[in-house]
Amino acid sequence: MIFVPLPFIVTLLLVLLAIRLARREEDAGQHHALFLALIGTYALQSVLVGLRWGYDVRAVMPLQAVLASFIAPLAYVAFRSLVAGEDARPAWNWPHLVGPPLLVAALYFMQPSPLGLVIVVIFLGYGAALGWMARRGPDGLVAARLDGAVRSYRALLVTASALIGSALTDIAISLDLDQTGGRHAPVIIALANVLALLLLGGAAAAADTGAQERLASPDEDDPDGEDGEDIGEARDVSLGAAPGEHAEQDAAILAALETLMGAGRLFADVDLNLGRLARRLGLPARRVSQAINRAHAVSVSHYVNGFRVREAQRLLETGDLPVTRIMFEAGFLTKSNFNREFRRVTGMSPSQWREARHSPPAPQPR
């Protein structure tokens, strides 16, 4: 019977996941290409783990070490593209993507003794960098679609935890080598790599799904130029204000937002993200999120989804459109997110809410 190591099964799952993501629209943006490359790298590393620990092919060890040092910075660069949005400069990515693998390759062939420690430091460093990146919450992912910002944020946390967990696993393996001569090392390495790669692959797919957006030019963002007056009002808001002036400035930003969401129906754009919303207002993304956070104590995604839920309520009450059609009309892209946000606001599912509104009132006792 042919022995198929578990990492090869993981590779198959990751390849199927990558194929599914690759079939998305071709103009989905640089983050899509980065997350797709990330999943492909996970799949290749899973193959190497299977060859090394399933068939004891030691010739793959150099590539395995170099690829491990490439995974962490690639994950950092991919999520950084969601934080920086269109301001991300690809030239800044190369030091991260090239430096660690070159260092590990040089150490492997010239001075291998500190190699394990260097890889641990790389994983801990980039894991901590991703954790720091997550400090602003979902609103920090300005390029993530608002319908999927929470999903992308959770993927960011999972990736940071998995990278740090991988570094701690390497430390546990080193201790096992010192204390038992490596009796448990093969099992620890195989299982830890399989678990980490599955978590990382799922996180990358979730982040990419949450980040999908059709790229639009400024003209496509505002084809009719209908909000020029409101955008100008938002631009006049000073960013260097004293704390006591925040309320007045926030009010101006929120008034422009209300116009965009109301008359402009910007909430109905399923590809809307914080970066695009900020561009419409002519303000930095962080300034917009701060105004919403201070005034409503919610994230930008919850703020926009509130408008979407109210639109869904209107359509559910006034017409007989299918719930799925209403979901798209209101600006939601996935049924799971639509149901979750609708229940968060109303306490009921869309179908329950429609049934309650259309049911005749119960007769009152005399």
Image (spheres, rainbow, N blue to C red):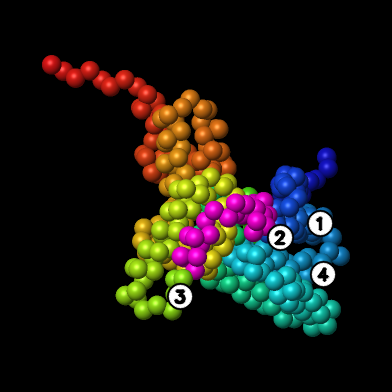
Residue 125 higher or lower than 14, as above or below: below
What's the distance in space between the residues labelled 3 and 1, CA to CA?
Answer: 56 Å
For label 2, the crowd category at 10 Å Cα-Cα, with few meaning under 14, some 14 to 19 and many 20 or more, is some
Q: Which residue is tagged 2?
A: 30
Could you tell me residue 8's position as x and y percent?
76, 49
Per the model, the C-alpha gap separating discs 3 and 4 is 51 Å
Q: Quadrant of residue 166?
A: bottom right
Amino acid beneath label 3:
Leu
Q: Position of residue 282 (x, y in %)?
A: 54, 66
Q: Is residue 317 above or below residue 101?
A: above
- Front residue (pair 259, 4): 259
Neighbour tally class for label 3: few under 14, some 14-19, many 20 plus, Cα within 10 Å? few
* Label number found at residue 51: 1
Label 3, label 2: how far apart the Cα atoms are:
30 Å
What residue did someone put label 4 on? 62
Q: What is the three-letter code of the residue carrying label 2?
A: Gln
The correct choice, above or below, for 3 with respect to 81 in the image is above
Q: Disc count in the image?
A: 4
How far apart are the alpha carbons under marks 2 and 4? 29 Å
